[in-house]
Structure formats: structure tokens, C-alpha cells
Amino acid sequence: MDTNQLSVLVNADAEQVWRMLREPAKIAQWHGWEMEGLDEEIRQIYYGSVKEGEDHLHLDLSMGDAFTLEPHPDGTLVTMTRGKATGEWAKYDSDITEGWTIFLQQLKFALDRHPHTPRRTVFVDGTSAAHTNLWDALGIDTGWLPDPGEAYKVTLNTGATLSGKVWYRTDSQVGLTVADYAEHGDGLLVLAQQAPVEGLREHPGAQIIASTYGLGAAALAAIGAQWDSFMETHFPDA
């Protein structure tokens, strides 16, 4: 496959996927994470200089990125074709691709597992003061994680024990379903290691996104406090 293409097979028909790409409230259930300015970011990316295919299977975004929906017998193949970042955005190109990788997996998770349940997110990020590897800091040996779709159970260096299934895995990202992150079913935890980038960050960085569903305020706050503490210890340059 073209290295500029990212794809996920979603357990939903193309009409459902299209609504997730064109309705602001639905986009907010998978794009990024909860933050001040998310509505404006969604408006700029999905409602600026965009072009909709009349068949509702193609969507061209303003910076050259494009979605294509391909109906399959068991769902819809969603492909993001990345445009090439230029000018001041060029140094962010690899990070943007990593971000779209996360967002596509969050889109798939939302449609596959929680199509009607609002998500609440915890997001933390930072840069190491040294050359800390995210997997070492967490105490995860990614080489020993099961394949996507298989069950896992791991105790992190934070003291938390997580269980569920491996959702996806790349060289720099791990997605895990977490039973404790949802009142019913499970939530999604994305762990992303960021490589040093000249002119952007000198040392490795990390992003952690927890998508939760139906949790009370205390449970959500406890998850946030756990990941805030981890980031302050290992990747303090936020």
C-alpha cells in the first residue's frame, strides 16, 4: 500500500461513516480529544476549503488530505491519503501522519464499540528531559504484546493493571482496549511514542489518549491524575 495512505476497516456502512465525517458533534466523538478549541479545529479541518464527493464516498480536505470510503461486505474501508505538508508545516508532517493514525483508530473504535455513547477523554503529552523511551517508562515490552484482537493483561510501572484486547499496533503506537475505561464494554487507550525531530523537539516525546465511556466524574478524574503523574515524572516538558 502507498506509504501516504492510512486505512481502517470499520464495522459500519458507508452512510454511517459519512455522517461521522460530516456532522460536527459526531466528529468530536473521534477526532482528537476534548480540549478548548476543538470545535474551531473541527470547523477549520472539515468545513473550510473542502470538497465533498457527490457519492458521499470522497472528502478532500483543505491541506491536501483526503478520505475515501469503500463499501465492503463486512463494513467500510476508510482510507486517508495524506497530502504533503509544506512551508512552516513541513517539520510537523510526520507528527500529523501519526495523529491521523490515532484518529482513524478512534473513528473505528467509536463506530465499532460505542456508536451512540458520548466519549470523555484524558489527554497528556510531553517531552523527555533525557532520552526516555515510552515503553520502558511504562514497563511494557511491546515485542511480547499479543497480536491485535487478542487478550492482554499488563501491570504498568505506575502500579495500574490494565486488561482487555490489543486494538492495534504500529512501530510507534499501541492501542489497547481497557475494561475499566467504560461503564459498559470497554474504552480505548492510545500510547504514542514520538521521535526527536530537528527544530521541533530534541528528545523523545509521548502522547497518551484515553477514550472513556459512561464513567462517573471520580473515575475519570482518577484516570487523569494517574496519567498526569506519569507524564510529570517521565516526560515533564509539556
Image (cartoon, rainbow, N blue to C red):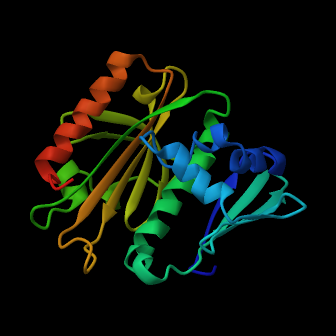
| Residue 78, position as x, y percentages in the image | 70, 60
**Position of the N terminus by quadrant:** bottom right
Is 178 above or below relative to 200? above
| Residue 188, position as x, y percentages in the image | 47, 40
| Residue drawn at 25 percent across, 73 percent down | 196
Comparing 177 with 38, the one in front is 38
| Residue 177, position as x, y percentages in the image | 47, 40
| Residue 192, position as x, y percentages in the image | 36, 57
Q: Is residue 189 visible?
A: yes
Query: Left or right: where does residue 133 sit relative to residue 104?
Result: left
Q: Furthest-right residue in view?
A: 55
Which quarter of the picture shows residue 113? top right
Q: Is residue 112 visible?
A: no
Query: Left or right: where does residue 114 sit relative to residue 167?
Result: right
| Residue drawn at 62 percent across, 32 percent down | 114
Is 7 above or below relative to 235? below
| Residue drawn at 46 percent across, 43 percent down | 33
Query: Left or right: where does residue 191 sit relative to residue 127?
Result: right
Is 210 above or below relative to 18? above
Comparing 129 with 177, the one in front is 129
Is 102 above or below relative to 94? above
